[in-house]
Image: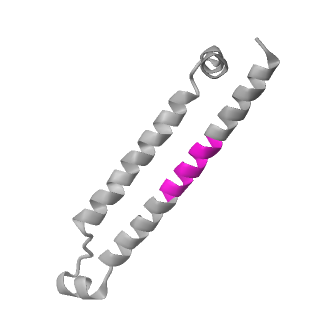
Amino acid sequence: MDIRCNKRVIGKVALLVIGIIIIMNALFLLKGLLGWYMVKSGLDEEVVSKTEIPRVSQYRLASHLGLAFIAYAGMFWSGLGQFLPRSQVCSCYCH
């Protein structure tokens, strides 16, 4: 195996990992903002004073859950990527 091949693979893998980290952090930031908005809207004084029970919109709750599923799938996908043998990675990028 050529040393230049290893440097190219390491460079491409490092860029891929950085991209995954950026995407996952952006997704968690979006999920956190949506969760904050969901809870804030459920604690509106007008809504709470009518029923005395905080209520959350089912659409905001479903979108928050959907983002959680997407985040979990992204973490699962990137975790599975760590189990690929190095020979398969090198053969994909160097030939």
* Place of residue 53 in the rendered image (x, y in percent of width and height, measured from the top left): 23, 77
Q: Residue at x 53, y 49 (%)?
A: 24
Image: 67 above or below 47: above
Q: Residue furthest right?
A: 3
> How far across and how far down the image is residue 33, in percent?
45, 67
Percent across and percent down for residue 21 are 60, 47
Magenta span contains residue 1: no
Main SS class of the magenta portion in the image: helix
Q: Where is residue 42 in the image (x, y as percent from the top left)?
A: 30, 75
Q: Please tell me in which quadrant of the rendered image residue 94 appears.
A: top right
Residue at x 59%, y 51% (from the top left corner): 22
Q: Is residue 25 magenta?
A: yes
Please determine whether, in this image, residue 50 is positioned above or below residue 60. below
Name the residue nearer the viewer: 45 or 88: 88
Q: In which quarter of the image is the N terminus?
A: top right
Q: Is residue 63 above or below residue 11?
A: below
Give me the residue at 44% from left, 59% from top: 31
Residue 38 vertical placement versus 90 (above, below):
below
Magenta-tinted stretch: 17-28
Q: In which quarter of the image is residue 43?
A: bottom left
